[in-house]
């Protein structure tokens, strides 16, 4: 086991956060999509893929007990289900529920001996406060758009052995995405790992997530002889103010790309006991010994390419301490079986800041250093059951009308992009002032954005359709910087909302009678 005591830098950073809270510098969680983003990435896309509760019933839960009740109310332990979570889940509202399709416990979200489940935060957000998520003897699990914080293994209250998310005992195909995992100290303060895998856990992806303020980021394998874990992908994550284990790999294969590592205080990616790590296009900043084999003489291996090392310090090599730097080079070749697109390491801090974590609107990167709204996969119609409470997602404060706004159309001369488009159309056609040209999505859903080089204040938009095709029947307007929902509606027209400074605004079509044609996407101050 490694030498891990929480550093003074960790405590200093937490003190700074406390000052920020006292002075009112607190960011609220914007409304999040209830839809699961399209498709697992990385190793979670292998071994048959990870689809979670796709195709099953969708229910709403506002307590841990309701989450357990939803699992226990299924026809079997493998019946697909999507559980939309809103509110704070804590010890007071997380009780054991019994049933033939579940195996739950109080004080922890227990995903045990089950499969085909999605947990997704919706509405004002889902916060698991001092309650961990435990995945054991389970497969095909998606956890998305949630915050898990301050889970302890000692002191009071305790949950999940101190892990924010922990996996163990024959776990397969887990995708954790757009989530925030955080602690308030290290082992001496009662915390353990933020994202741990052991005892034969394989085919896992952690993407677009934030891990911060912890002594331990996470491990793969519980000892030098427990080498049954592997095939893990970490991409577009922020590791911030972590002492060590970012992650610790004991055997197996892992792929780390386009992550931002900031303030790794003692060590970072610790490849040991024969582990193989593919480490590419990451941005390491203000950190120490970010890659190597640490606290053991059982060597690990790595392949490095395209990484940026910004103010990284390196320790001398020792018998049980082998940093990869100061000039990291590959000591192995590591291949992966899936396709992926790399963002340049130079833009990783910006892209990750705009996409990673809960409440970011599920924004993703397409390799162009420009965050995009993903095309959501359809979700089943939510219906109440005796075991979980269903309630509508709150609608943002906005007004949709057909009256045109006054003033200058700020889209003229701006930039634009979007999701896949139909043949013969262009994103630029929605900002050219010409109603005879248009953009169409590849099907009945998709998104198109208008963007500026600097933040621009808008308070209304007008979407004008061209005739001759399908018409829009449902849409959302998104703040492209944060993913917050500015407005929603049915038919296209004019929407007004509180004045908001944005660098990008996205019109997301969620329904249409056929392939729609957006002739103009106008924006006004």
Image (cartoon, grey):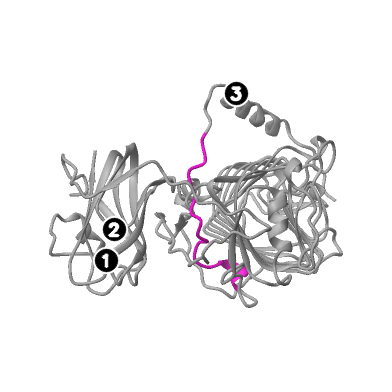
Q: Which of marks 3 and 1 is nearer the N terminus?
A: 3
In percent of width and height, residue 65 lies at 72, 51
Check if mark 2's residue and mark 3's residue have beta carbons within 8 Å.
no
Q: Which mark is residue 491?
A: 2
Are there few (<14), some (14-19), or many (20+) residues within 10 Å of tag 3? few
Circle 3 is placed at which residue position? 19
> Which segment did they paint magenta?
27-45
Q: Which of marks 2 and 1 is nearer the N terminus?
A: 1
Are there few (<14), some (14-19), or many (20+) residues within 10 Å of tag 1? many
**Horizontal placement of 89 versus 365: left or right?**
right
Q: Which residue lies furthest to the top in this view?
A: 23
Q: Which of marks 2 and 3 is nearer the N terminus?
A: 3
Is residue 43 part of the magenta span, yes or no?
yes
Are there few (<14), some (14-19), or many (20+) residues within 10 Å of tag 2? some
How far apart are the alpha carbons under marks 2 and 3? 46 Å
Between 268 and 165, which is closer to the camera in this rendering? 165
What residue is drawn where x is 82% and y is 60%? 298
* Label 3: which secondary element: helix
Between 212 and 28, which is closer to the camera in this rendering? 28
Circle 1 is placed at which residue position? 471
Task: From this view, report whether residue 356 is shown above or below residue 113.
Answer: above
What residue is drawn where x is 50% and y is 51%? 392
In percent of width and height, residue 306 lies at 52, 58
* Label 1: which secondary element: loop
What residue is drawn where x is 76% and y is 67%? 101
In percent of width and height, residue 205 lies at 62, 63
**Horizontal placement of 330 versus 108: left or right?**
left
Counting the numbered discs, the total is 3
How far apart are the alpha carbons under marks 2 and 1? 8 Å
Which circle, 2 or 3, is nearer the viewer?
A: 2
């Amino acid at each position: 086991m490694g030498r891990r005591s929480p550093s003074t830098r960790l405590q200093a950073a937490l003190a700074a956060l406390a000052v920020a809270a006292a002075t009112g510098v607190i960011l609220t969680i914007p409304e999040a999509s209830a839809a699961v983003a399209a498709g697992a990435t990385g190793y979670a896309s292998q071994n048959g893929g990870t689809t979670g509760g796709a195709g099953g019933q969708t229910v709403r839960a506002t307590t841990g007990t309701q989450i357990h009740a939803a699992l226990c109310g299924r026809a079997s332990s493998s019946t697909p289900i999507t559980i939309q979570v809103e509110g704070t889940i804590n010890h007071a509202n997380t009780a054991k529920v019994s049933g033939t399709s579940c195996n739950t416990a109080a004080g922890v979200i227990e995903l045990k001996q089950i499969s085909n489940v999605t947990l997704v935060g919706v509405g004002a957000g889902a916060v698991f406060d001092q309650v961990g998520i435990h995945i054991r003897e389970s497969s095909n699990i998606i956890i998305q758009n949630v915050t898990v914080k301050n889970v302890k293994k000692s002191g009071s209250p305790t949950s999940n052995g101190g892990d924010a998310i922990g996996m163990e005992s024959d776990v397969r195909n887990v995708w954790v995405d757009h989530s925030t995992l955080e602690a308030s100290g290290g082992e001496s303060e009662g915390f353990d790992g933020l994202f741990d895998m052991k005892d034969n856990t394989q085919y896992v992806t952690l993407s677009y997530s934030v891990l911060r303020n912890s002594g331990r980021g996470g491990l793969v394998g519980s000892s030098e002889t427990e080498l049954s874990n592997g095939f893990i992908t970490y991409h577009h994550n922020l590791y911030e103010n972590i002492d060590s284990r970012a992650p610790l790999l004991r055997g197996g294969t892992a792929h780390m790309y386009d992550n931002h590592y900031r303030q790794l205080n003692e060590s970072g990616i610790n490849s040991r006991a024969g582990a193989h790590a593919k480490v590419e296009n990451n941005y390491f900043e203000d950190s120490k010994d970010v890659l190597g084999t640490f606290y053991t003489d059982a060597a690990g291996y790595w392949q490095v390419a395209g990484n940026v090392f910004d103010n990284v310090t390196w320790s001398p090599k020792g018998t049980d301490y082998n940093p990869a730097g100061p000039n990291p080079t590959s000591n192995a070749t590591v291949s992966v079986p899936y396709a992926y697109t790399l963002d340049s390491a130079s833009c990783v801090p910006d892209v990750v800041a705009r996409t990673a974590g809960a409440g970011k609107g599920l924004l993703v990167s397409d390799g162009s250093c420009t965050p995009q709204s993903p095309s959501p996969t359809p979700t089943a119609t939510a219906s109440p059951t005796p075991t979980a409470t269903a309630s509508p997602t709150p609608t943002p404060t906005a007004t949709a009308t057909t009256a045109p706004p006054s003033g200058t159309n700020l889209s003229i001369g701006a930039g634009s992009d979007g999701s896949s488009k139909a043949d013969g159309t262009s994103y630029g056609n929605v900002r050219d002032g010409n109603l005879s040209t248009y953009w169409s999505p590849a099907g009945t859903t998709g998104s198109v954005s208008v963007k500026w080089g600097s933040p621009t204040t808008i308070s209304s938009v007008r979407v004008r359709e061209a005739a001759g095709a399908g018409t829009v029947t449902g849409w959302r307007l998104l703040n492209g910087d944060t993913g917050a929902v500015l407005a929603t509606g049915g038919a296209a027209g004019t929407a007004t909302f509180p004045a908001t400074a944005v660098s990008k605004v996205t019109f997301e079509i969620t329904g249409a009678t056929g392939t729609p044609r957006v002739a103009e996407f106008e924006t006004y101050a």
